[in-house]
Amino acid sequence: MVPDVGDEELNTIREVFSTGFLTEGVTTQNFEKAIAEYVGVKHAIAVTSCTTALHTVLECLDVRGQEVIIPDYTYPATAEAVILAGGKPVLADVDLEIMNMTENILDEAYDEAMSVFIPVSWAGVPLERGIYKKAKELGLECLEDAACSLGAKIDSDYVGKLADYSCFSFHPRKVITTGEGGMITTDDDEMAEKCHSFKHFGMKGSSFETIGTNYKLSNVLSAIGLVQMKKIEKIIASRIEKAKIYHDLLSKIGGIKPAYVGKGTRQTFQSYTCYVEKDNYRDKIRNALSENNIQSQIGTYALHLEPAYKQLRKVGSLKNSELLFKNGLTLPLHKDLTLEDQERVCHIIASTLSS
Ligand SMILES: Cc1ncc(COP(=O)(O)O)c(C=O)c1O
């Protein structure tokens, strides 16, 4: 992914430099306001990454010693945040097509000892609306790992206002970037105050009432974020347009399924991840693309297969997660990608699959 940053971002960094105030201040507060307004929530709390955003919420919910349901198919950060906060991640499977957890999977994974659930809207595919309702019925706090999903919508509702708490990433591979950065969104006044204090050394008023961290986001990075927020709709529209082109080209090739497209939702296509149906061909395709100087990625990880997470409790067989880890293929999708580039990528895929 080539980040969409340029002169406007550079100029705004210069403006922050000219104030002499580089740490978190008014610019970060303005960035928080911009995200809260965009998503449609009362509070947005800027932090240093999505990982530290998740950690902040989990510490403030106090999950120490408790089991927390997460999908097996996710980036390790989801599990790391739970472990950092003293919780015990429990790994559940995802739907093979949607690549996310569903209402039914949550129902099967749930047991009464659990109080927090972290669904991941992976690749910028929104969750099913019903999963939020199901989490409520089960009495679970729902913390969405929306690292890839700023700007994703279900009908007219933005991801970030559907869960009790949502966490976004501004890593350069995400929809908008600040280099590194993250944001928590919520309508809960008390939790917003706690999260704010946690990122600020545990400070409340002029005293330190709890143990905190320094997860503040600097004005320099927030200034980049403010410029990026002016571009977000254009960035997403362009990604959707390029995803449609991939969809049409890949639909004509046997042995590969284009990326999932949900009805009544807007995806960000933060990752355009298709599924290689022909057995053992994903890596052959990746090698063929690489020989032509085209970068591709896997989808994401099946955590239970990684050494650090082997010991975690699992529910069910996790077979969809394993299949996605083995066969998921993320194609290049960035601002400089041309129609000719996309045709070339698909031509290489077609000829590899027919070999
Ligand atoms: C689903 C998911 N959650 C969390 C993260 C971590 O985000 P950050 O790099 O902002 O900590 C990532 C990064 O790729 C991710 O894909």
Image (tube, rainbow, N blue to C red):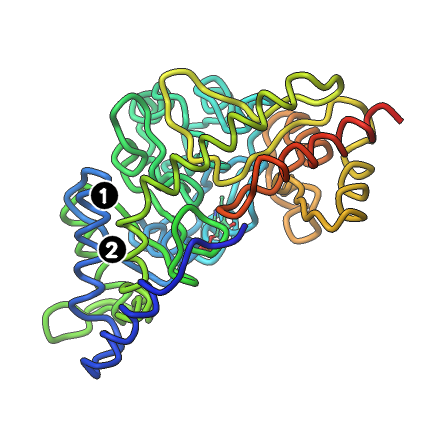
Disc 2/disc 1 C-alpha distance (Å): 9 Å
| Mark 1 burial class by Cα count in 10 Å: few <14, some 14-19, many 20+ | many
In the image, residue 1 above or below residue 222: above
Q: Nearer the viewer, residue 158 or 52?
A: 158
The answer to which of marks 2 and 1 sits earlier in the sequence is 2
Mark 1 lies on residue: 186
Residues marked 2 and 1 touching at CB (< 8 Å): yes
Does residue 75 sit above or below 26 in this rendering? above
Numbered badge on residue 45:
2
Side of 86 relative to 323 (left or right): left
Q: Secondary structure at mark 1?
A: strand
Q: Please, what is the three-letter code of the amino acid marked with disc 1?
A: Thr
Which quadrant of the figure has residue 354?
Answer: top right
Circle 2 crowding by C-alpha within 10 Å: few under 14, some 14–19, many from 20: many
Q: Position of residue 14 (x, y in %)?
A: 28, 76
Position of residue 259 measured from the top left corner of the image (x, y, whole percent): 57, 26
Q: Is residue 158 left or right of residue 303?
A: left
Residue plotted at (24% across, 48% down):
35
> Residue 300 at x, y = what percent?
61, 41
The residue positioned 31% from the left and 28% from the top of the image is 139
